[in-house]
Every structure is written in C-alpha cells, then in structure tokens.
Amino acid sequence: MRVPLVAGNWKMYKTVAEAVDYARRLKSSGSPAGVELAVCPPFTALLAVGRELAGSQVGLGAQDMHWAEEGAYTGEVSPLMLKELGCRYVILGHSERRQHFGESDEAVNAKVKAALRHGLVPIVCVGETLAEREAGRAREVVAGQLRGSLAGLAAQEAGNVVVAYEPVWAIGTGRTALPEDAQEMSAFIRALLAEMFGREVAGKVRIQYGGSVKPENAAGILRQPDIDGALVGGASLQVESFLAIARAAAK
Ligand code: 13P
C-alpha cells in the first residue's frame, strides 16, 4: 500500500518568523492518520522550521538543490547542507525552475542522483504547458521529462522517488485538472515507470498531483487510484487549508 504524501511547496513565501509560527500551529494541530505530511519552506527558514517540527511526524523538504556536495557555485545549496538541516525531501525540476531558471532534464537528473546518494527523497516534478496539451503533446512531454529526469537510476533507487504530476497550466491559476485527466496521466506515468524499472517498482512509487489543489477540489483528485497525494502551493500557506487537504488524502 502506498501511503499518500501531501507536501506543501511554500515557494518564495514566508519570513522565518512567519514560518516558525506556521510550524508551531501545524505541530500542535497534529497530522491526520494514514497520510504523510511534509512542508518545503524557503532555504532561509529550513533550520528554524526543522527545529519546530522536531519530534512531529511532519517531514521537512527543500525546494531545490545543487548536485555537488560542495564547490564554487555561488548561490547554491548542496545535498549535504540539506541533510544537516534534517531534510527528508527535496523538490526537483519544478516547472518554475524549468521555466524561469532554464533547468534541463539533464540537470534534474544529476540532482535526482545526488539526492538518492545522500538519502534524500526527491520529489520529481513533470508536467506539460497549455500549448503542449492543446497540441496533443502532453504525454510525449511528460514522458520525455520523466525519462530524462530518471535516466540511469537503478530499479531499487527509483522505488524511493516521488513523482509529482503538475500540469503547468494548473499551477497558481485556480484551474485544476479534471480528476479523470489527472488520473489518466498518473496511470500513464506509472506504466512508463513499469517499462523503465519494472512493475514492482512502479507499484511502489508515489505519484502526486499538483496544480491549484484546494480543500474544495482535493477529495475528487485524491480518490483516484494512481494519485498518491498532492504537491500544494498556495493552499499550503495556511495551516487550516493544508490540513483540510491532508484529511482528504487520508480518506
Ligand atoms: P498551486 O497549488 O499554488 O497551484 O501551486 C502548485 C505547485 O506548483 C506546487 O509545487
């Protein structure tokens, strides 16, 4: 059985003070049973949030990282540094990184390998743009990103990866994918994983949906058989809405 993972991607939101306040309230609310929760604050708040969440079930994640352990890479953060802060997860290849920072599948692949080497669970994001969907190329794009990002992994490593299907047109737009469409793409991703790493591994990998997930639409999406949780942006910024989504995943 795959335990659903509901992760909050805070993006570039929250000061340390705001993040600590959130973490305190989240910890005291307690997480629902049958679902794993994680929060991914900005780098600046990881240490403080990790300290607040110590002893709770909520996992800590980063939003990106470099693949090298250390080096002359101004502005970057390494897997070792994230481990030291107590991170369990790292989001890799988010569409905002691909779009605004030119991140390629090759770079994502190097980061995924580095994460696994250091015992971090990569949350690997894939998803098509509106133009690609309208051109009937959604599957082709997602397949290319998935193959590129997970190239060269051993089957046993691939079993530890989380994949987040985030159609770019649904991110921050209030326009969610229909549950049937999100399910169809998730089933496609799982079939692709089976082709790449075998059926057993594909059956283990958690596939999240992301893109305008809110308490109002979460249940319909999260009840789909191949969707194992959500990667939540805007609605994860308030404890109440984040937990409401988590409860929908737990059912
Ligand atoms: P929203 O939930 O704000 O649409 O963001 C989704 C996302 O990008 C999560 O990584």
Image (cartoon, grey):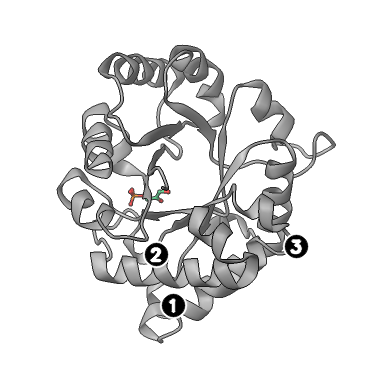
Which residue does the image show at 38% across and 19% down from the upper left? 23
Q: Tell me the residue that label 3 is attached to.
A: 152
- Left or right for 166, reference 43: left
* Disc 2 packing (10 Å; few <14; some 14–19; many ≥20): many
The answer for how far apart the CA atoms under marks 2 and 1 are is 9 Å
Q: Which quadrant of the view contains residue 250?
A: top left
Residue reaching furthest left?
216
**Which residue does the numbered mark 1 point to in the structure image?**
138
In this rendering, the answer to whether 211 lies above or below 180 is: above
Q: Secondary structure at mark 3?
A: loop
- Specify whether residue 53 is in view: yes
Above or below, comparing residue 62 to residue 54 in the picture: below
Q: Nearer the viewer, mark 3 or mark 1?
A: 3
Distance of mark 2 from mark 3, alpha carbons? 25 Å
Look at 59% across and 52% down and name the residue there: 159
Label 3 sits on what residue type? Gly
Amino acid type indicated by mark 1: Ala
Q: Determine contact: label 2, label 1, CB under 8 Å.
A: yes
Q: Earlier in the sequence, mark 3 or mark 1?
A: 1
On screen, residue 58 versus residue 183, left or right, reads: right
The residue labelled by disc 2 is 167
Query: Which mark identifies residue 18?
Result: none
Residue found 56% across the figure and 29% down from its top: 43
User: In this figure, what is the number of numbered marks?
Assistant: 3
Residue type beneath disc 2: Pro
The quadrant in which residue 30 appears is top left
Q: Position of residue 80 (x, y in %)?
A: 73, 29
Mark 1, residues whose alpha carbon is within 10 Å: few (<14), some, or many (≥20)? some
Neighbour tally class for label 3: few under 14, some 14-19, many 20 plus, Cα within 10 Å: some
